[in-house]
Image (tube, helix red, strand yellow):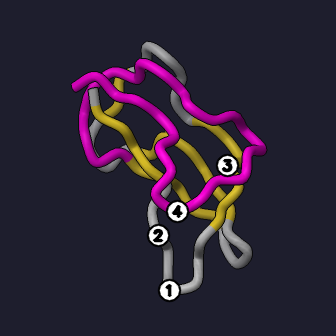
Amino acid sequence: MSEIVVPKWGLTTEEVVLLKWYKQVGDQVAVDEPVAEAETDKVTQEIVSQIAGTVTELLVEEGDELTVGQPIVRIDP
């Protein structure tokens, strides 16, 4: 089991808000495929997967405030 975490987008970004999930439990995901959309204090960006597999668990909900490095989804490769 692997996890996708909130990436660090720039030197000052420490928190983001998860705006929208693109994937749900049971969905397949490929490397570099967007799984969610998040907003920093300056920009909206997609969080992409670094691994391929099946989404097994969403660890946060839309609207949640997240910190850089926080796991957001579990993937079964």
Q: Which residue is mark 2?
A: 8
Q: Which of the two discs, 1 and 4, labels the residue nearer the N terminus? A: 1
Q: How far apart, in angstroms, are the residues tagged by discs 4 and 3?
A: 12 Å
- Location of residue 24 in the rendering, given as x and y in whole percent from the top left corner: 54, 22
The quarter in which the N terminus is drawn is top left
Crowd band around label 3 with a 10 angstrom C-alpha radius: few (<14), some (14–19), many (20+):
many
Magenta stretch: give its range. 49-77
**Eye-nearest disc, 1 or 3:** 1
Residue drawn where x is 64% and y is 53% of the image? 66
Give the residue type at disc 2.
Lys
Q: Secondary structure at mark 1?
A: loop
Residue 65, percent from left and from top:
72, 52
Helix, strand, or loop for circle 3? strand
Residue reaching furthest right? 63
Report whether 30 appears left or right of 73.
left
Q: Position of residue 62 (x, y in %)?
A: 72, 38
Measure the alpha-carbon separation of dots 2 and 3: 14 Å
Mark closer to the chain start, 2 or 3: 2
**Among numbered discs 4 and 3, the one appearing first in the sequence:** 3
- In the image, 20 versus 75, the foreground residue is 75
Residue under numbered circle 3: 18
Q: What's the CA distance linking mark 2 and mark 4?
A: 6 Å
Query: Which amino acid lies under the numbered mark 1 shown in the image of this protein?
Result: Leu
Question: Residue at position x 60%, y 50% from top?
Answer: 37
Looking at the rendered structure, the secondary structure element under dot 2 is: loop
Question: Relative to 46, does residue 71 appear above or below in the rendering?
Answer: above
Q: Is residue 51 left or right of residue 59?
A: left
Q: Which residue is mark 1?
A: 11
Q: Which mark is residue 68?
A: 4
Quadrant position of the C terminus in the picture: top left
Badge 4 density bin: few <14, some 14–19, many ≥20, Cα 10 Å: some
